[in-house]
Image (tube, rainbow, N blue to C red):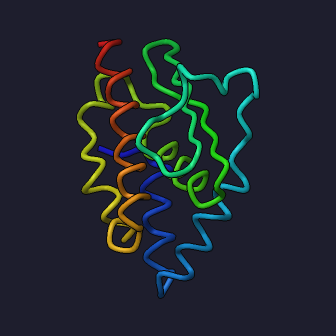
Amino acid sequence: MATEAFRDLAETFEFLDDWEDRYRHVIELGKAFPPMEEALKVPATKVNGCASQVWIQPTIENGRFDFQGDSDAMIVKGLIAVLHTLYAGLPVAEVLRVDASAELARLGLTDHLSSQRSNGLRAMVERIRKVAGEAV
């Protein structure tokens, strides 16, 4: 159910032997992810429930889901990039069918994130699902 980009990411994670390598890769994804315009970092785009500052601005064009996102923590920005590979470009109705927990478990992220980071990741997924649900 995930995007082709996410399947590619999951394959990359299979080649990374330990969590530290995966953690570094998530940080690199965050560094490569485009910054969000400062004008979009407003209370309406802020994701509550995250230990770090997190903003997500979803967009739907031609029935397809996408979003911009940013964080003040590089690992969290990497997690935003991971979610972007999971959801970006999917038809809006398919966003709701993605089992984010199962897909993210393929990367081994859920076993190694702090409880605060895990809660923040869940909050980001909930925001994405809420916007997609309202658009269907």
What residue is rendered at 24% in x and 46% in y? 99
Specify the quadrant of the image occupied by residue 75: bottom right
Circle count: 0
Image quarter in which the C terminus is found:
top left
Report whether 31 appears left or right of 49: right
Image quarter in which the N terminus is found:
top left
Residue 133 in percent (x, y) is at 29, 19
Residue 104 in percent (x, y) is at 35, 58
Residue 80 in percent (x, y) is at 54, 47
What residue is rendered at 67% in x and 49% in y? 72
Residue 91 in percent (x, y) is at 38, 24
What residue is rendered at 75% in x and 28% in y? 37
In the image, residue 38 sits, relative to residue 102, either above or below, namely: above
In the image, residue 62 sits, relative to residue 117, either above or below, namely: above
In the image, residue 48 sits, relative to residue 81, either above or below, namely: above
In the foreground, 53 or 22: 53
Specify the quadrant of the image occupied by residue 97: top left
What residue is rendered at 60% in x and 70% in y? 25
In the image, residue 2 sits, relative to residue 7, either above or below, namely: above
In the foreground, 60 or 20: 20
In the foreground, 40 or 106: 40
Report whether 87 appears left or right of 55: left
